[in-house]
Image (cartoon, rainbow, N blue to C red):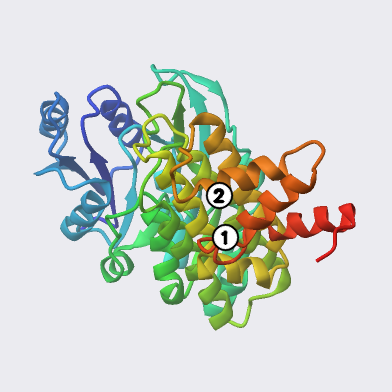
Amino acid sequence: MPLISIITPVYNNEKYVKNAVESVLRQGFDDYEYIIVDDGSTDNTPQIVDEIAGEDKRIRVIHQKNQWIYASFNNGIKEAAGKYVYILNSDDRMREGMLAKMVQIVKQYGPDVVWTKVLSHRCDAEQKIMEYDCGKADQKVKNDVFLSDVNEVRNAWFTLTLQGLNHNQANLYKRELMLRHPFRNDVYGADTLFNIAIANDVHSAFVMKEAVYDFMVYGVPHMNASEGKYYPYLHEMFNDIYTGNRSLYKAWNLYQEDVREYWSGRRMGELTDELYTMCHPACQLTTEEKAANALKMYEDSIIRECAMESGRQEELESRILSGLRMIMAQETLESTSKYFFLYELLEGLLCYETNLEDYEKIRRAVYHPLNKYHLGETFFLKIKREGCLDN
């Protein structure tokens, strides 16, 4: 029985899958099994991977109906025989010599997880690297570290986050841990949520100083498909990541100021990302629906609690108003829309010189019946004070 199972999910990736597989075959280490999960590809991918498997007894291919990437992860994990599992996506690569290094660590320490660095490289359509390690991940981990018990793992969890290690699936995990916590298959951030799900069951871990994984960032439109696009589940996904992490730290009595500030600041930043995705050309929402979504973000109890807990109420208002401004600069909100008061709010707030008519327009918008939590009130009151208006 092999110690390690490597899993590569693939869907319609005839161009790059062979490069991913060859990066494993060049490892100079033989005691592993390699499972390729073909997720119902309709191009030449099935023929390519079957041909590769026919030439190497360590490789086997699972052909399935299209189920999406995280279902492919789960199905590969179920079929795996190894004690540990490493997942390599079909358009990325494993760095040379790293499989043997991980095996050495596993044999010496037997950790539940080996955390491994991912280097992101900007490349062209031929995988020629144009900018190496553009995220500077290689600078974030300088030494090997063995976390020998639960307390050491938990005390290091925030550091793992800052190092970029516990937000993706590119780590070596005990298979039993992965079977106990299957990946969700409904959001693209399921890898981050997986690491939150396993956190309480990680009793030991090893942090590798060497990078194992080359993540290729393509400069072509159809690659890196999730980047910048609008997804209806985006807000709930980011909330799940925020609340999941906050719950962990609170349960571990480690919800300290630096942790709180990091996660609240990150969640506020993600709001801007959400608003930006609604301006993506592929977003099919109407301007009214976008305005309604922005207002819902502001009214969300999780978001409001996050802002209040960290003193970011004004930042929250600013981000929502800026997002609305971006949306309405791109598209017109009809005057007949029930959310037209948001346009009037922006128009009033953006006046170079505000007169009494503008003040009244802002006041009506801030206290409009649909503006439940008075979006814009902070700035209205500032204008009011500066203008020395009466109540």
Which of the pair 96/171 is nearer the observer? 171
Please tell me how crowded label 1 is: few (under 14), some (14-19), or many (20+) other residues with Cα within 10 Å: some
Question: Does the CB distance between marks 2 and 1 fall below 8 Å?
Answer: yes
Q: Is residue 353 above or below residue 363?
A: above
Query: The residue tagged with tag 2: helix, strand or loop?
Result: helix
What is the x, y in percent for residue 308? 67, 70
Q: Nearer the viewer, residue 101 or 358?
A: 358
> What residue would you read off at disc 2?
341
Identify the image quadrant of residue 371: bottom right
- Left or right: residue 230 versus residue 63 is right
User: Which residue is at a point 28% across and 64% down the rendered structure image?
Assistant: 182
- What is the spatial separation of the Cα atoms under label 2 and label 1, in whole angstroms? 7 Å
- Which residue sits at x=16%, y=56%? 79
Residue at the location (64% across, 43% down)? 346
Quadrant including the N terminus: bottom left
Mark 1 residue element:
loop
**Residue 186, image x, y percentages:** 29, 55
